[in-house]
Structure formats: structure tokens, C-alpha cells
Image (cartoon, rainbow, N blue to C red):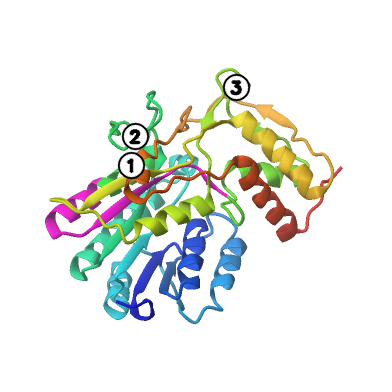
Amino acid sequence: MTKENKVYLITGAAGFIGHFLSRRLLDQGFNVIGLDNVNDYYDVNLKETRLKLLQPYNNFTFIKGDISDKELVLSIFEEYKPSIVVNLAAQAGVRYSIENPDVYMQSNVIGFYNILEACRHHLVDHLIYASSSSVYGANKKVPFEETDFVDNPVSLYASTKKSNELMAHTYSHLYGIPATGLRFFTVYGPMGRPDMAYFGFTNKLFHGEPIQIFNNGDFENDLYRDFTYIDDIVEGIERLIPHSPVGEVQHKVYNIGNSNPEKLMVFIETLEKCLSNSLGEKVEFEKHFEPIKPGDVPATYASTKQLYDAVGFRPQTSIEEGLQQFTDWYVEYYGVKVEV
């Protein structure tokens, strides 16, 4: 099948990862169908900006809609006959899942079920779907390996992602759908999600507000996070697309993380340094320390051995490099300066 007639369906195309993956595929000449409900969980303008950058491509088709709409999903498969499906549409956020559980069940469970049903009735070469590092819960053993026990999620968001893995395994077993789940570890970068800590901290700086750090001010036992730059995430997905699982059950799960966790405080100091570089003047956050929030975990740390063994790739963008890219973009996009 040539690039000209190979069709990719990317759900969540107005989202952070969906946008960058779509651009990578479009640049290579593939046909991309983007599906997104463009909800207002965070700044819709940012989602619209991402979409505007995709619109000039002749090989891009955008459909505004929700994966929880089964008729719509089935009609898209019927009309466009995608050979590769990358399901990135989901209600994101650990803390928000405690406040608003309904939307997580609708999007992450019902929506994903609809995608599986569509793949069942319209055979695809490969279904790739977003899982999350949150499935590891409060696991103490690090680094997290794909073979670890993941039956103790500590948030509803994590539960929905674990359910996706179970559902995909079942559909692969019953209907022979080649499916790969990706456990993403704290993705960051330009045009990222404003609900993520690094973006929220930056917003607060320019509004003259203190940042809240949920580690009780405990610098010895600080939170660790495996921060993974967006380009590394997209590279991992792209390499896995032709690498569909084989075997009795054609289902596989991979970690995609930087495998180099950083203390939260080191990450914040690096963000201050990068913002200072972008602005040409020294900046420092006003910091308020609070107890860890329900649903948060003390550490995330990916083992990427299985990913490397499969496709010869492991993320390696440093936080210094990745955050500099983010702060340069932020200062230009918002046209900001520090309020004194």
C-alpha cells in the first residue's frame, strides 16, 4: 500500500500528542483523518491553534466529533477505511477524575469500546492506543516494567487506562486485532497541555501568583517524575506503527518514558533557568508547599528496555533541552513578560 492511499485515523488530533503525531505523518505524505471533540477541559484556543497548523495540509481531513458517539465512529471507519488507528482521544488528568468521574467513563471506557468495535468490523493493520504510567499506581519497585503488577490504581483515570489495556487484550484475543498500548510518562513540550504542572507554573509566574508544590516541602523525599519530551513520544509511536504485535494474542504494551526521573524541585529550578534564558532576565517562582494530593504517586520511572528491544529507540531528550523549547515557545506565543 502506497503512502497516497494509506489512511491514518488519529483520534484526539487537536490534542498535544495527536497534533504532533499528525504533523509528522502529514509531512511524510500520509493521509490523516483527525477526530476530536475540541472540548473545553483546557484552553480551546490552544486546540484551535494546533488544528490551524494542520489545516494547510491537503492530505488532512478534520472531523469534529466524540469517540463516545458510536454511530459517528462506525461511519468514519466505513467511509475512510483507515488501515492504522491511533487512539489518543481521552479525558486526561488525574485530579480532575476525582471531581468529574462521569466524563472519564464516557470518553475513556465507552469511547475506547467504540474504537475497538469499529476495528472489529473494519479490519485494521494496527491499533495503537494511549495508556498511561498512572496504571502503575503507587508501585514501590522502580523502574516500572511492563511485567509489573498493575492491579492497584490510585485514581479513576488510572483505572480507565488499565481497563483499556484489558479491553484491547480481549478484542485482540477474540477478533485478531493487532493492538499496542503505550504507557506515556509525563509528556511535556511546546503547545503542551495547560493543566500540566510545568505549564501551570509558567502561567502563574506571568500572573504574579505563587506556585503550589505538592511535596510538603520535603526535599529529601521529593516527588520524582519521568518527564518525556513530545518529540520522543512521537518518535516512539512512529517506530511502533509498522511493528504490530505477533503471536497467539496480538496485543502488546510498552512504556514510553525518558527513563531518567528528576526530582520535582530540580525540574522547577530548570524551568526557572529556561524562562530566564527566554526572557533575558532572571526569574524565580514564589513557592508554596502543600501535602501530596489524593491520586498522585510519589514516583514515576519507566523501564524502556522492551521498547528499545522492539524498535531500537529510547527517549533521551534532557529536561534542559526540552524545557528550553517549551519556554521559548511560551514567551513567543503569549507575548509575555514578567510582572514586577
Q: Quadrant of the N terminus?
A: bottom left
Which residue is depicted at the point 47% across and 29% down? 299
Crowding around mark 2 (Cα neighbors within 10 Å: few <14, some 14 to 19, many 20+) is: some
Element at badge 2? loop
Left or right: where 14 falls relative to 191: left
State which mark lies toward you, 3 or 2: 2
Residue type marked 3: Asn
Q: CA distance from mark 3 to mark 2?
A: 28 Å
Q: Residue at x 43, y 70 (%)?
A: 34
Q: Is residue 97 magenta?
A: no
Q: Amino acid at mark 2?
A: Glu
- Disc 3 vs disc 1: which is toward the camera? 1
Query: Tag 2 or tag 3, which sits nearer the N-term?
Result: 2
Give the residue pinned by disc 3. Answer: 216
Give SS at disc 1.
helix
Residue 293 in picture, x, y percent from top left: 51, 30
Q: Earlier in the sequence, mark 2 or mark 1?
A: 2
Residue beneath label 2, please?
A: 145
Give the Cα distance between marks 2 and 1.
9 Å
Specify the quadrant of the image occupied by residue 115: bottom left
Q: Secondary structure at mark 3?
A: loop
Specify start and end residues of the magenta stretch as a single range. 166-188
Say if 222 sits above or below 69 in the image.
above
Q: Amino acid at mark 1?
A: Gln
Which residue sits furthest right?
340
Give x and y (percent) for residue 318.
59, 41
- If you read the primary sequence from the N terminus, does the residue marked by circle 3 or circle 1 appear first? 3
Residue 227 location (% of width, % of height) = 53, 40
